[in-house]
Amino acid sequence: MKGNESISGKDMIFRADQIDLKSLDMQLEKHLSRVWSRNIEKQRPAEEWEIDLAKLDLRNVIAHGTYGTVYRATYDSQDVAGIRARLSS
């Protein structure tokens, strides 16, 4: 840097090994589920067993299994287990 120039957001450099991709992935999934749940709510009424995904906050991984991943989570301020199922192709 020369003189009293400041660093803009586009000039910042990040090390790839210091980026928390799991956290970013969880944030993106939470955002997308909010957007998708809004679109679904407009199309049809919710079933009795459905939850509001905007209230679900996935925290850390508890376990990985054949059918998906289990997370420690909170739903509407209650501790719960959140499951992210693997889709078979």
Image (cartoon, rainbow, N blue to C red):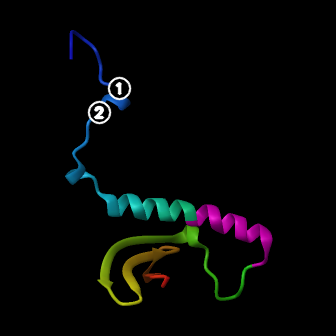
Query: Magenta stretch mostly in which secondary structure?
Result: helix
Would residue 65 appear left or right of 85 to someone viewing this image? left
- In the image, 40 versus 52, the foreground residue is 40
Q: Residues within 10 Å of mark 2 (few under 14, many from 20)?
A: few
Element carrying mark 1: loop
- Residue 61 appears at what percent x and percent y? 32, 76
Q: Which disc, if any, is residue 12?
A: 2
> Residue drawn 47% across and 59% down?
28
CB within 8 Å, label 2 to label 1: yes
Q: Nearer the viewer, residue 77 or 52?
A: 52
- Residue type at mark 2? Met
Q: Which residue is mark 1?
A: 8
Classify residue 24 by image quadrant: bottom left
| Mark 1: amino acid | Ser
Which quadrant would residue 36 be assigned to in this image? bottom right
Q: Whole-percent x and y of residue 17?
A: 20, 53
